[in-house]
């Protein structure tokens, strides 16, 4: 039986004070994103990425945005003018704060329940306000470390993989709306022919990221929507002019109904996918970049504590949206500025009347874009273990990943997926340490994220000159910090970091 040694006071204080995830693999890398006050550095970086590919990436998340926006507006639960205006404003704000394409997307769980239960505008606002207030509180008080400091990497990767499967399913459902190749009911602008053609086009240019494929598909969809609007003589219903937002203050009953019916189900999704998984994905896609989860929860809170009172649908960030924009070419905040300006102009100039055109946008194009963007999110799950050279640990980590992803998809609930993944990881952790060699008691000390080797185990190795156990602990504070396989790792290159290989070889 292994002997448990309590951590020292210095060790406890060291990891409790940390607000960000740090890892030995990316801690020495320079931050590729200049701070928001370095305007010259930001301008220089945007100039380097001033390409069609960058603007194309801004459209990588419309497969989620457009269907939800249209449905909530038609039902009267949200204002199209307010949603476009504030959605664009938040795009610009988050681009300036983060310097990367940190997407702004609808709160999908709230939207789904709102459409099922036919929420009023006040009930939708109440759900968004309740969730955002709690997320904002957890971030500002730094209580979120209780979630993140003890979350193993395979659980985070399982959340990302499960979200990938869910979004892929939604993309397929969009394509199936008009899933016909021929027949009397075929719609010339939206059918399986166009879905197949756009899918093949995206695959053909998959490795040629300079091609702005998202912009090509989107512009073709806009042309089809305009053609259908003209064919049905509906341009007279589109009114250009100045449109303004209006206050939508929920009553106490609407707030209670909205929060209890939809907000409670959205809360774990926002905390896990919009904060924890998003921060992990941003670190992997942009090596050296270390976003603060306090900042992420803060922007989510501000977006809804302001927008929901003025008729906007609830917004959040999300790992799927970031993966989608990255997949289609976005690398800087320039893509968010571009998208934000478009949203604001459309919302102010056309307002609610824009719905006449949007409802003709081909769902087959939206489905294909959402499906391929989701694949990018799933790709990052392949770097799921901190122990690539220990087969038994990799097998255990892979089981944790599969349990998390399968439970998330099976129950359609991020919270249950997270819970089952954490239980599985805890059982494996107990199994390893109850069978550990008692010659290494320090291996159970709280660890810091110092790369692919355990801090405590490395400390033991340094003192004794012996090799630490290959199954060292990662179910300790800070372990979820390590994402990817090392500096330069991305959704395309999965090669292990040479320093990680050297560290293992030196053991």
Image: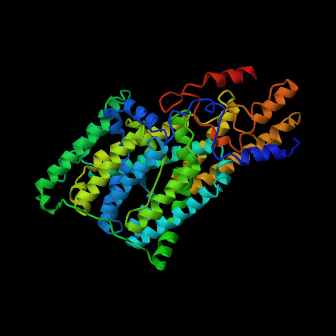
Residue 235 visible in this rendered orientation of the protein: yes
* Residue 344 percent across, percent down from the top left: 31, 54
Q: Name above or below for residue 437 compared with residue 257.
A: above
Side of 174 where 410 appears, left or right:
right
Residue 186 visible in this rendered orientation of the protein: no
Q: Name above or below for residue 361 compared with residue 250.
A: above
Q: Give the mark count.
A: 0
* Residue 3 percent across, percent down from the top left: 89, 42
Hey, which quadrant is residue 414 in on the image? bottom right
- Where's the C terminus, which quadrant? top right
- The structure residue drawn at horizontal position 33% and vertical position 57%, both measured from the top left corner, is 84
- The structure residue drawn at horizontal position 24% and vertical position 47%, both measured from the top left corner, is 191
* Residue 222 percent across, percent down from the top left: 22, 47
- Where's the N terminus, which quadrant? top right
Hey, which quadrant is residue 442 in on the image? top right
* Residue 137 percent across, percent down from the top left: 59, 61
Side of 461 where 89 appears, left or right:
left
Colouring convention used in this rendered image of the protein:
rainbow
**Residue placed most toward the observer, 98 or 389:** 98
Side of 203 where 153 appears, left or right:
right
**Residue placed most toward the observer, 305 or 282:** 305
Q: Name above or below for residue 163 compared with residue 381.
A: below
């Amino acid at each position: 039986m292994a002997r448990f040694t309590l951590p020292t006071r210095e060790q406890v204080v060291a990891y409790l004070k940390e607000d960000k995830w740090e890892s030995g693999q990316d801690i020495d890398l320079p931050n590729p994103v200049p701070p928001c006050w370095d305007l010259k550095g930001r301008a220089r970086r945007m100039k380097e990425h001033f390409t069609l590919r960058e603007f194309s990436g801004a459209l990588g998340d419309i497969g989620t945005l457009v269907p939800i926006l249209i449905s909530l507006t038609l039902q009267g639960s949200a204002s199209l003018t307010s949603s476009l205006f504030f959605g664009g404003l938040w795009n610009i704000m988050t681009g300036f704060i983060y310097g990367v394409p940190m997407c702004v997307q609808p709160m999908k769980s709230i939207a789904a329940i709102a459409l099922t239960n036919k929420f009023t505008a006040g009930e939708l606002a109440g759900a968004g306000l309740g969730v955002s207030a709690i997320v904002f509180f957890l971030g500002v008080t730094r209580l979120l470390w209780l979630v993140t400091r003890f979350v193993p990497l395979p659980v985070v990767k399982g959340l990302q993989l499960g979200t990938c499967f869910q979004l892929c399913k939604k993309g397929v459902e969009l394509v199936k709306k008009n899933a016909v190749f021929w027949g009397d009911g075929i719609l010339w602008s939206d059918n399986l022919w166009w879905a197949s053609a756009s899918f093949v086009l995206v695959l053909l240019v998959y490795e040629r990221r300079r091609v702005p494929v998202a912009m090509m598909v989107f512009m073709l969809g806009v042309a089809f929507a305009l053609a259908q609007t003209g064919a049905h003589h509906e341009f007279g219903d589109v009114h250009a002019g100045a449109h303004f937002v209006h206050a939508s203050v929920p009553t106490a009953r609407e707030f209670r109904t909205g929060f209890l019916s939809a907000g409670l189900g959205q809360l774990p999704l926002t905390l896990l996918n919009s904060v924890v998984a998003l921060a992990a994905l941003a670190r992997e896609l942009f090596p050296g970049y270390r976003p603060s989860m306090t900042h992420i929860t803060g922007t989510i809170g501000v977006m809804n504590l302001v927008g929901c009172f003025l008729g906007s649908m609830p917004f959040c960030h999300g790992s799927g949206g970031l993966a989608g924009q990255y997949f289609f070419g976005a690398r800087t905040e320039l893509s968010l500025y571009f998208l934000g300006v478009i949203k604001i102009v459309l919302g102010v100039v056309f307002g609610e009347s824009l719905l006449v055109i949007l409802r003709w946008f081909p769902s087959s194009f939206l489905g294909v874009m959402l499906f391929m963007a989701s694949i990018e999110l799933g790709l990052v799950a392949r770097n799921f273990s901190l122990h690539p050279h220990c087969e038994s640990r990799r097998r255990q980590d892979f089981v944790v990943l599969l349990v998390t992803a399968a439970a998330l998809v099976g129950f359609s609930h991020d919270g249950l997926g997270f819970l089952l993944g954490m239980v599985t990881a805890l059982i494996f952790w107990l199994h390893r340490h109850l069978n550990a060699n008692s010659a290494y008691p320090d291996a159970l000390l709280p660890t810091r994220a110092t790369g692919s080797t355990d801090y405590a185990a490395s400390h033991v190795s340094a003192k004794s000159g012996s090799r630490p156990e290959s199954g060292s602990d990662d179910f300790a504070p800070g372990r979820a910090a390590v994402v990817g396989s090392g500096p330069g790792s991305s959704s395309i290159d999965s090669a292990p970091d040479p320093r990680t290989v050297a560290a293992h070889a030196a053991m």
